Image: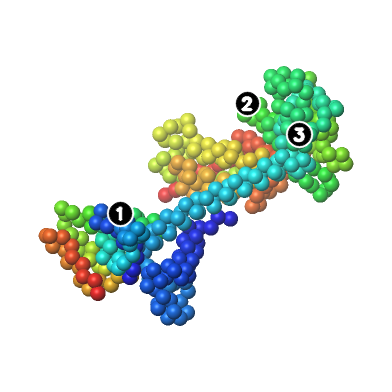
Amino acid sequence: MARTIKEIADGMKQSFVNDTSIRSMYSLDTDWNNRGTQTALEFYNAHFSAVSIETIFIYLVAIVANAIEVLFDEHKANITRIVETERFGLPGWYRKMALQFRFGAGLDENYYDPDGDFAGTDIYPDQYNDDRNYPHIVKYAYAEETAEHLGVTIKIAKETDGVLSPLDDGTADTDNEIAAFTAYMNRIKPAGIPVAVVNSQPDQLTLSLLVKYDPLLLNADGTLISSPSDKPVEIAIEQYLNSIDFNGRFVPMKLIDVVQVAEGVKIAEVTSATAQHAGYDPQPIGIEYMPYAGYMKLESSNLTINYEAYV
Amino acid sequence: MNGILLDDDGNLKIQHGTLAIGNNELQCVQLLVGSSTGEFLHAPKLGGNAKQMICGKPDPFWRGSVTEQLKQCLIEVSNIAINQSGISIEIK
């Protein structure tokens, strides 16, 4: 982890006065021998002004050193992420492979991948590398190792006009996308690892909010006085829900943080929040909620906002 | 207090082929008084802001502020005077 500029500068100051030749250059030997319990850093600060050229130099070098350390941290994080994604059999690899699924394309049965990274161009024969006829239908995926399945759980969703939905299952004259996807994952996965695919309708979110609004800016129905077609609170809620990653956690406190900076909002509070997956009973949301399907949907009929003027 | 010295143009002073080191108290005073607040990244509150008083009315709190700042820079001041010819600072 990168050290702060101050930590680096303090280290340099200590090294500076600990050096015998530097001390003699500055005629500090006598003071150094009589410093008593004074630390090297205290000794430096007692003998070099904050505006001295030495201190300015030290901070300049410390700033550069800090920038390099931050860059190294970033580099390390990038490499770690690549290793997690590229290494065969890790959860990140399952996610990557799920996103590379092409609907309607066959796998090369006899293919042996010499570099072991199983990139999309490796597993599909050349005639299938065509996005128009063999599209990547899985737009969102999340993979995790699960103890209850003794294997890997993969959550997936596709996207149509910006709306997330499960892969079609062949009912109502649709293609059986999920069967093809499941067969694909079972064929490429390491032998002996069970894979459970979660491909379900979004969890239904129900929200009730109490909003104290500034009557100078908002009407009682939440519309902007200056632009009656805009409802800042509803826009803020939509923005927050869109900002959650696939399989990310819904946190009511973070929602409130976003709502409270909306125009005309003075105070906001979530009075009730529930989530319902498929045919299960709605369950109240406490501090956070991780959707079973990997994503959530908030119907306008499930959103109740009570506006009260802030006076 | 010894330190690296600057020449009259503000460049590093070179003596015998190396950086000149000597008493730098006057130089520190000059640097502090001539600097603006925030100019020293490591000590952002420091700054004499003398340039702000040019062609204007001297700030009555300026002397106290600069005395305090110079003390933080390890320089004790006995007197600061502002007159028509400029600023004069006496160091203890």
Label 1 near label 2: C-beta < 8 Å? no
x%, y% of residue A132?
Answer: 69, 19
Per the model, the C-alpha gap separating discs 3 and 2 is: 30 Å
Is A292 rendered above or below residue A30? above
Q: Amino acid at mark 1?
A: Asn
> Alpha-carbon neighbours of circle 2 within 10 Å: few (<14), some, or many (≥20)?
few
Name the disc covering residue A161, or none: 2
Q: Is residue B33 left or right of residue A106?
A: left
Q: Amino acid at mark 2?
A: Asp
Picture quadrant where residue A82 is located? top right
Q: Amino acid at mark 3?
A: Phe
Per the model, the C-alpha gap separating discs 3 and 1 is: 60 Å
In which chain is the residue bearing label 2? A
x%, y% of residue A253?
Answer: 58, 50
Which of label 3 and label 2 is nearer to you? 3
In which chain is the residue bearing label 1? B
Residue drawn at x 22%, y 66% as measured from the top left: B63
- Is label 3 on the same chain as label 2? yes
Per the model, the C-alpha gap separating discs 2 and 1 is: 63 Å
Q: Nearer the viewer, residue A61 or B69?
A: A61
Mark 1 lies on residue? B11
**Quadrant of the drawing holding the N terminus of chain A:** bottom right
Residue drawn at x 30%, y 68% as measured from the top left: B23
Q: Earlier in the sequence, mark 3 or mark 2?
A: 3
- Is label 2 on the same chain as label 1? no
Give the structural element (helix, strand or loop) at label 3. loop
Mark 3 lies on residue? A118
Which of label 3 and label 1 is nearer to you? 1
x%, y% of residue B38?
Answer: 35, 55
Is A17 rendered above or below residue B56? below
Question: Is residue A214 shown to the viewer in this render?
Answer: yes
